[in-house]
Amino acid sequence: MNKNVIYGINGPVVTVKDTDSFEMMEMVYVGEQKLVGEIIGITDRLTTIQVYEETTGLKPGDPVTGTGAPMNVLLGPGIIDNIFDGIERPLKAIEAASGAFISRGAAVSALDAEKRWTVTMRIRPGDRLEGGQIYATLPETPIIEHRVMLHPELSGVIKEVKPDGEYTVFDTVAVLEDDKGRTHELTLCQQWPIRTARPVKERLAPTIPLITGQRVMDTLFPIAKGGTAAIPGGFGTGKTMSQHQLAKWCDADIIIYVGCGERGNEMSQVLDEFSELIDPKSNRPMTDRTVLIANTSNMPVAAREASIYTGITLAEYYRDMGYHVAVMADSTSRWAEALREISGRLEEMPAEEGFPAYLPSRLAEYYERGGRADVLCGAQGSVTLIGAVSPQGSDFSEPVTQNTKRFTRVFWALDKSLAYARHYPAINWIESYSEYFNDLDPWFIENLGEEFVDYRNRISALLQEESSLMEIVKLIGSDVLPDDQKLVIETARVIRVGFLQQNAFHAEDTYVPLEKQKKMMETILHLHSKAKEVVAREIPISKITAMGLFDKLTKMKYDIPNSHLEMFDDYMNEIDEKLGALLQ
């Protein structure tokens, strides 16, 4: 290990003079308290270190110790149902050791070194193992089986295997001899650098949807497993709530929630909610398949950047076991602000709005790590990335939103006026888009029939038509519109209130299966088609609205339980009877 001393300190940026013993991106320990840092710049004169903890109290002359390895995380059983800070320190264990406040330089193992796991070995002496293959399994939580994999850069022949039994994460369970004759002791854990993507066999096309149970997302703007999405919105538009709903209800196997620069009370709310919530698939607590990374706004700013990479590395690790993982990053704007602050301290040339010129490449690097893949163990897994963006004043033309748009294929634009009108999720159906239709439509057609895609297109067309009609209404009022256009506005109101608006606190409406979503669209469009026939006979639309059918359809999301879809037939029959009587 190399020893050097601090030359200068500027916030989280520390410099060391006249040293050639460090490497770029090497992890180092700074000061007597061994604060975690990373080398981010080397010249012939100065080495620059980004420190991931509060630097108050450091002084020139304090030691800097190199580790010879890049910034990495420890991967193994015990990650799920845990809460970490941005550099994978377990906050529960730190609280037990130092109380409610994190002491600087707190050196606690990311994984519980004392806990014993019931391990089943999957190999025998003489077996050949390639990187990424599974050699042991154990129950990490009641619903997640942890598959212990060989480090991706190792391969060789198994020389020795311990019997099935109880082991800690650092116990040797097997011995492998590589092709060069060197022996490696295999434990239940491995280390991986957070800025390096883990390798896969082959990347796959995003052809399976991530089903969220949120109608506006599943039907109008779907996302694929392994897809990337942005949720931009100003203060109070419901970004965090939308991500909570996705985390609770989407059909991913594992959720990794990264609170990056968010308020501490929001993170504590996530903790409280997730510990009380029952997972609908397993009837177990949600925490049995959730990892939380808390890097709140009062924590050191540099660690925000690390928290994003820590989250994606944990996600890739579980993807490599064959799981579908969803990563919620809330919010990437706070990460970009951290980049801007550190860039300013490094005196780099600023680009648009003071952000560093490398902001687009950092965002691209992050979103590029999503995807569905054939993994090294022979299974299929995926990492879906959903990033919240917090543009100041809801200005979507600012750099973080614009650059995120370039690298994500789903854009769920949250609208301040919808949020203030209490329309949640406040996703603007005109500004939002999904680029996954061509990839996902074959799945929807196979599982829900061609009508599903047809209904979605017709619903979108009606919303677009209403948007242009409302421009006329604002100028001259609705009375001058012909009845067929008034019918479009009336139907679009049912779509907005009865279909797109969803109540997260209502037992039947918080999660809606795709079959019910299809039936709801079918019923709304059936009413529109029948009413169109009536209007074509020059019967006033006021007679149709007086029947209360439109109002009844706005409430069907509550009135028809998810388990009684046959009730839609009664609605269809009622529409036929009442409008048929008008025609006669």
Image (cartoon, rainbow, N blue to C red):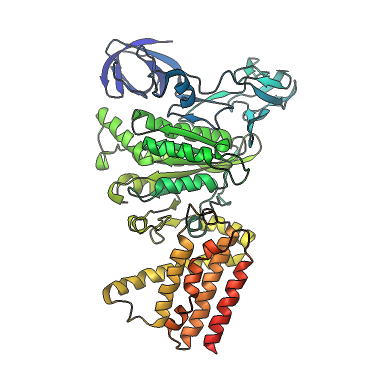
Whether 517 is drawn above or below 2: the answer is below
Q: At x 71% / y 26%, what residue is drawn?
A: 120
Q: Quadrant of the C terminus?
A: bottom right
Classify residue 105 by image quadrant: top left
Q: Is residue 329 left or right of residue 570?
A: left
Q: Is residue 373 left or right of residue 5?
A: right
Q: Is residue 434 left or right of residue 263?
A: right
Residue 11 x, y percent position in the rendering: 27, 24
Residue 174 x, y percent position in the rendering: 68, 19
Hey, which residue is sitting farthest bottom in the picture?
584
**Closest to the observer, 433 or 278:** 278
Residue 74 x, y percent position in the rendering: 52, 24
**Closest to the observer, 242 or 201:** 242
Whether 77 is drawn above or below 258: the answer is above
Q: Is residue 406 visible?
A: no
Q: At x 51% / y 23%, what residue is drawn?
A: 110
Q: Is residue 13 visible?
A: yes
Whether 333 is drawn above or below 448: the answer is above
**Closest to the observer, 129 or 292:** 292
